[in-house]
Every structure is written in structure tokens, then in C-alpha cells.
Image (cartoon, helix red, strand yellow):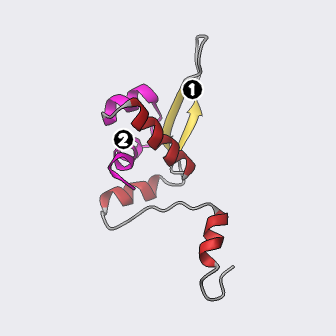
Amino acid sequence: MDFFDERVLTALKDGKPRSFTALLNEVGFSHNTLQQHLERLMAQGLIVREKATANSFGRPKFAYHASSRTTKQVSLALQDPHVELVALPFSRLRHVCRFEKGGH
């Protein structure tokens, strides 16, 4: 987890959904940088993107928040610099465990 990921997770650790624009204003880095880190954090399952209700036509709006299953881990990782969050898909975890004694 790098500086940018930490900033995004710090902004979302309270569990309240935020729009991309609100999050962009809060973290203070460029549009593309935020988008790249949001995509990575979503792929790791640390944050969730949900379609926000809209009263108008046009592009859909999305809200981002820390997933309910990771809110506690995110808070702990941000408080303790020695804790690192790692998210692996099962297939990758299985590959890593294959080299352990008795692993599969």
C-alpha cells in the first residue's frame, strides 16, 4: 500500500459513501491518479463502488466507500504502520500456499 492508497482509505474509513468529485477534493491529487488507485483498491476488495441514485439523465454517478468487511482492517492498518493489508484472490493464495508443507 502506497501513500495514495493510504490517503484514499483514510478518506473512506468512516464508511460514508463519497462521490468521485468529493473524494477528489478531499484527497487532493489528480483525476487520473485517483481513478487508478480506486480501481486497484476495488480489485483488492478494500473499497466498493455503488451506483448512486440520480434524479436526472446522463452518465450514472457512483459513490465509493470502504467495504463493510474491511472497515475494521483499514482502520487498524492506518493506525499501525507495521500492519500491511494484503488482498489476494483465492487462485493466487492457492499458488502461494502450494510451496508450504502440506499446502494446497
Extreme-top residue of the structure = 56
Q: The disc labelled 1 sits on which kind of residue?
A: Ala
Mark 1 residue element:
loop
The residue at the point 62 percent across, 66 percent down is 92
Q: Quadrant of residue 34?
A: top left
Q: Is residue 83 above or below residue 33?
A: below
Say which residue appears at 39% left-offset and 32% top-offset. 23
Residue placed farthest to the bottom in the image?
101
Where the C terminus falls, by quadrant? Answer: bottom right
The mark nearer the N terminus, 2 or 1, is 2
**Image spot of residue 77 (x, y percent):** 37, 60
| Label 2 element class | helix
Work out whether 87 lies above or below 38.
below
Is 14 magenta? The answer is yes
Which residue carries the number 2 mark? Answer: 11
Give the labeled residue for mark 1.
52
Q: Which mark is residue 71?
A: none
Q: Position of residue 50 (x, y in %)?
A: 58, 34
Q: Quadrant of the N terminus?
A: bottom left
Seen in the picture, residue 50 relative to 42 is either above or below; the reply is: above
Cα distance in 3D space between marks 2 and 1: 18 Å
Position in image of residue 98 (x %, y %): 65, 79
Q: Tell me where the magenta segment starts and ends, as one range.
A: 1-27
Q: Nearer the viewer, residue 41 or 50?
A: 41
Dominant secondary-structure state across the stretch colored magenta: helix
Q: Circle 2: is it few (<14), some (14-19), or many (20+) Cα within 10 Å?
A: some
Q: Quadrant of residue 103?
A: bottom right
The residue at the point 31 percent across, 63 percent down is 80
Q: Residue 49: within the magenta?
A: no
Amino acid type, residue under disc 2 in the picture: Ala
Where residue 20 sits in the image (x, y, percent)? 45, 29
